[in-house]
Image (tube, grey):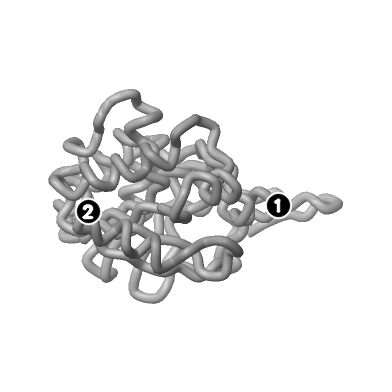
């Protein structure tokens, strides 16, 4: 529910959980270490699938679990939204643990930069909390990655590759992804990179929730 004042939409409630098909997506932060040119919020649009995802506050662990309800009602529960979930790593891990305890399957969609941000290898922390990991590789080389993702930290793409490779030891399913239709992005090369580390690859479509 919203109230329009001029051109500004003010939400009375934040959207924490939103179903899409047989999955439930969790929106736990709007902060991110990337400034991707293809992200809708870069252009001032906070909507995904018609839902306005700008948070009024970052939800607590209790609010996240309550928003999920019965996780067994969904194929999987996915930490995604319009922000990077690992900016709130420990809340995500605790929520993931509880969701799994309640019978849910948990997927984490991430930019793969958690090790760089936390200045340590956090991949072992994912074990037992996350069932599947979707890592945004987005490009086959540094220059293309920097062009589209506009990272705040140097050597970000290398950090993504290292994170995904290490995570394969602790998360049952690791998938690297890239978006189809971005000029200069070689999807076949991205798939080859995933194969070299024993990870899966998924081609994403811009603006489509999957």
The quadrant where residue 123 appears:
top left
8 to 123, vertically: above or below = below
Q: Quadrant of the N terminus?
A: bottom right
**Tag 1's secondary structure?**
helix
- Name the foreground residue: 25 vs 156: 156
The reply to whether residue 210 is in sight is no
Q: Earlier in the sequence, mark 2 or mark 1?
A: 1
**Tag 2's secondary structure?**
loop
Residue 16's disc is: none
Percent from the top left, x then y, of residue 80? 42, 53
Percent from the top left, x then y, of residue 104? 21, 60
The reply to whether residue 169 is in sight is yes
194 to 35, vertically: above or below = below
Residue 197's disc is: 2
Left or right: 148, with 68 as reference point: right
Residue 43's disc is: 1
179 to 138, vertically: above or below = below
Residue at 34% across / 58% down in the picture? 176
């Amino acid at each position: 529910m919203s109230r329009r004042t001029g051109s500004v939409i003010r939400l009375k409630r934040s959207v924490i959980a939103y179903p899409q098909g047989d999955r439930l997506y969790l929106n736990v932060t709007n902060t991110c270490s990337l400034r991707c040119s293809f992200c809708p919020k870069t252009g001032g649009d906070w909507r995904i699938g018609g839902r306005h995802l700008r948070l009024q506050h970052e939800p607590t662990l209790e609010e996240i679990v309550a928003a999920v309800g019965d996780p067994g009602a969904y194929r999987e529960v996915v930490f995604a939204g319009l922000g990077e979930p690992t900016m709130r790593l420990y809340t995500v891990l605790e929520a993931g643990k509880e969701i799994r305890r309640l019978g849910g399957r948990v997927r984490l969609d991430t930019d793969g930069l958690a090790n760089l941000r936390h200045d340590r290898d956090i991949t072992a922390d994912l074990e037992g909390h996350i069932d599947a990991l979707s890592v945004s590789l987005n490009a086959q080389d540094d220059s293309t990655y920097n062009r589209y993702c506009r990272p705040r930290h140097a050597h970000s793409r290398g950090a993504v590759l290292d994170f995904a490779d290490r995570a394969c030891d602790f998360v049952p399913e690791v998938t690297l992804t890239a978006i189809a239709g971005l000029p200069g992005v070689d999807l076949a090369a991205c798939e080859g990179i995933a194969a070299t580390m024993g990870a899966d690859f998924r081609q994403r479509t811009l603006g489509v929730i999957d």
